[in-house]
Image: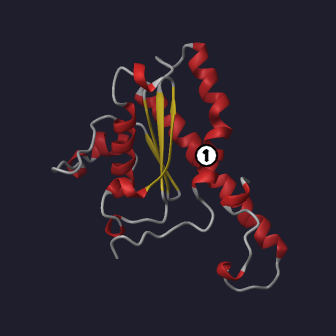
């Protein structure tokens, strides 16, 4: 039903922020080394439980975003491009390089939204992340690192829950030690 978004039991904005923090040293090292063509980057993480039919606009499915560099000095709209990459991957379940190179007929444009021809996203076990600002292959590298960190953080909390083995049958019957409010 439109307007009623599903939410992840484990992956909220705080976990998404922590995932970006986990990979930040690698991103900054690549920027400082000159491997990346600039120090400007935008990352978008989509809500893994929200589906297109549940939201008024695709942007409502964005879980978390973060920028690197001074946005006032950016050469292009890396935020908008990253959002477009994330939305295309979220909508189709495919990374943007696959969309662009092998299934361009799935790219869309209408008065509300247009997909981008640029690539640089990750779809990893339902976690969708996109990045924009550097070379497409490094945008994709960043996206996969962040997606893997999101997945690992959530699996870690779930493993802790399983190890408790308090014999509750459903996750909603458990008090979640790893909820996003405690910054874990």
Number of marks present in the image shown: 1
Name the quadrant of the N terminus: bottom left
**What kind of element bears circle 1?**
helix
Residue closest to the far top: 34
Q: Is the residue 96 above or below the residue 175 in the image? A: above
Residue closest to the far left: 111
Q: Is the residue 12 above or below the residue 44 in the image? A: below
Residue under label 1: 17
What crowding class fits label 1: few (fewer than 14 Cα within 10 Å), some (14-19), or many (20 or more)? some
What residue is at 30 percent from the left and 63 percent from the top?
56
Rendering quarter of residue 102:
top left
Residue sitting nearer the eye, 3 or 101: 3
Q: How is the image coloured?
A: secondary structure
Residue sitting nearer the eye, 142 or 61: 61
What residue is at 47 percent from the left and 70 percent from the top?
6
Rendering quarter of residue 135:
top left
Residue 139 in picture, x, y percent from top left: 46, 32
What residue is at 82 percent from the left and 81 percent from the top?
166
Q: Is the residue 151 above or below the residue 78 in the image? A: below
Name the quadrant of the C terminus: bottom right
Residue 37 is left or right of residue 150, and the answer is left
What residue is at 38 percent from the left and 31 percent from the top?
78
Residue 71 seen:
yes
Residue 53 in picture, x, y percent from top left: 32, 69
Residue sitting nearer the eye, 173 or 119: 173
Residue 172 in picture, x, y percent from top left: 65, 80
Residue 119 seen:
no
């Amino acid at each position: 039903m439109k307007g009623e978004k599903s939410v992840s039991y484990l992956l909220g904005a705080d976990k998404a922020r922590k995932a970006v923090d986990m990979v930040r040293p690698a991103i900054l090292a690549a920027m400082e080394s000159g491997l990346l063509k600039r120090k400007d980057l935008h990352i978008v993480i989509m809500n893994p439980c929200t589906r297109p039919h549940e939201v008024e606009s695709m942007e409502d499915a964005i879980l978390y975003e973060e920028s690197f560099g001074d946005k006032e000095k950016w050469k292009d709209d890396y935020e908008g491009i990253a959002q477009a990459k994330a939305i295309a991957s979220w909508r189709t379940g495919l990374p943007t390089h696959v969309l662009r190179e092998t299934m361009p007929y799935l790219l869309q444009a209408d008065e509300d939204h247009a997909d981008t021809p640029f690539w640089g996203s990750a779809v990893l076990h339902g976690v969708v992340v996109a990045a924009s600002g550097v070379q497409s292959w490094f945008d994709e590298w960043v996206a996969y690192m962040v997606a893997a960190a999101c997945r690992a953080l959530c699996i870690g909390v779930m493993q802790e829950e399983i190890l408790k083995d308090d014999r509750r049958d459903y996750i909603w019957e458990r008090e979640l030690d790893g909820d996003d409010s405690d910054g874990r």
